[in-house]
Image (spheres, helix red, strand yellow):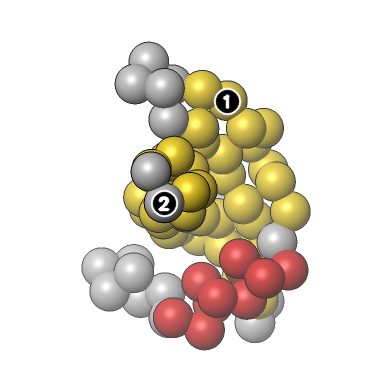
Amino acid sequence: MKERKIGRRQVLETLKHGTISEPLHQDVRGDWRCNISWHYAGERITLGAVLKLQESGEWVVIATVFEG
């Protein structure tokens, strides 16, 4: 985020309102991945999300964020 000058608010709004721009798929490690995109403040923000299943349940880890 810092490197690409993308703020926390942009990330949170993308998670809240974004749409899946790359369908959910399982990688070789068994993790589920997808991209979520949203237009915020005139910029298209895309989050690369990884969904992991742990003993406590599912949770989301944002692997990367970029404009485009």
Which residue position is annotated with label 1?
A: 25
Q: Quadrant of the N terminus?
A: bottom left
Q: Is residue 55 above or below residue 41?
A: above
63 to 8, vertically: above or below: above
Give the x, y percent position of residue 4.
34, 67
Front residue (pair 4, 62): 62
Q: Is residue 39 visible?
A: no
Residue at (38% x, 43% y) in the render: 55
Residue 22 image point, x, y percent: 64, 36
Residue under label 2 = 56
Dot 2 or dot 1, earlier in sequence: 1
Residue type for callout 2: Ser
Q: Secondary structure at mark 2?
A: loop
Compared to residue 61, the image places residue 7 above or below, namely below
In the rendered view of the protein, which quadrant contains the C terminus?
A: bottom right
Q: Amino acid at mark 1?
A: His
Please state the horizontal and vertical placement of residue 6, each as a whole percent of the image: 42, 74
Q: Residues within 10 Å of mark 1 (few under 14, many from 20)?
A: few
Q: Residue furthest left?
A: 3
Most distant residue in the front direction: 55
Which residue ends up furthest to the top in the rendered image?
Answer: 28
> Which of the two residues, 58 or 5, is positioned nearer the viewer here?
58
Q: Secondary structure at mark 1?
A: strand
Q: Nearer the viewer, mark 2 or mark 1?
A: 2
The residue nearer to you, when weighing 67 against 51, is 51
